[in-house]
Amino acid sequence: MSAPFRLRGDGIDLYVRLTPKAALDRIEGVETAADGRSHLKARVRAVPENGLANAALERMVAKALGVPGSAVSVVAGGTARLKTLRVLGDAAALAKSVGALIGG
């Protein structure tokens, strides 16, 4: 299984499959798509209107990785379920945090 992120010079790009309007805000682990790409499975209570679900996802990921909210942003897939989040910071430390988060 491939990692659900890609290292960058200024942090990581994290691939996420988001389900809005869930009962709880939570990260549920990693899922591999039919094309072999892995992504983090996340659920948020927010509705997918006016960017509310994306903002909730950014806050949840920032808290889970221990980075400021301003360090996390949706850079692709703003209106789709599959999203790319850019997380700014030390790439090696962020990769380690993601690994701990998904139990890998």
Image (spheres, grey):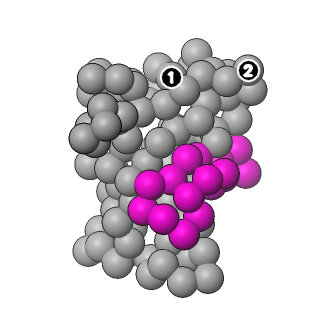
Q: Is residue 34 above or below residue 47?
A: above
Decide which of 91, 16 is in the foreground and name it.
16
Q: Is residue 84 above or below residue 65?
A: below
Q: Which residue is mark 2?
A: 9
Three-letter code, disc 1:
Ala
Residue range in magenta is 68-85
Residue pictured at 59% horizontal, 35% vertical = 13
Q: Amino acid at mark 2?
A: Gly
Residue linked to disc 1: 95
Q: Can I make out residue 38 in this image?
A: yes
Residue 96's place in the image compared with 54, above or below, is above
Instruction: Confirm whether the magenta stretch covers residue 13.
Output: no
Q: Nearer the viewer, mark 1 or mark 2?
A: 2
Relative to 22, 90 lies left or right: right
**Residue at image point 48% right, 65% down:** 80
Q: Is residue 68 left or right of residue 26?
A: right
Where's the C terminus, which quadrant?
Answer: top left
Residue 16 at x, y percent in the picture: 43, 48
Quadrant in the picture for residue 7 = top right
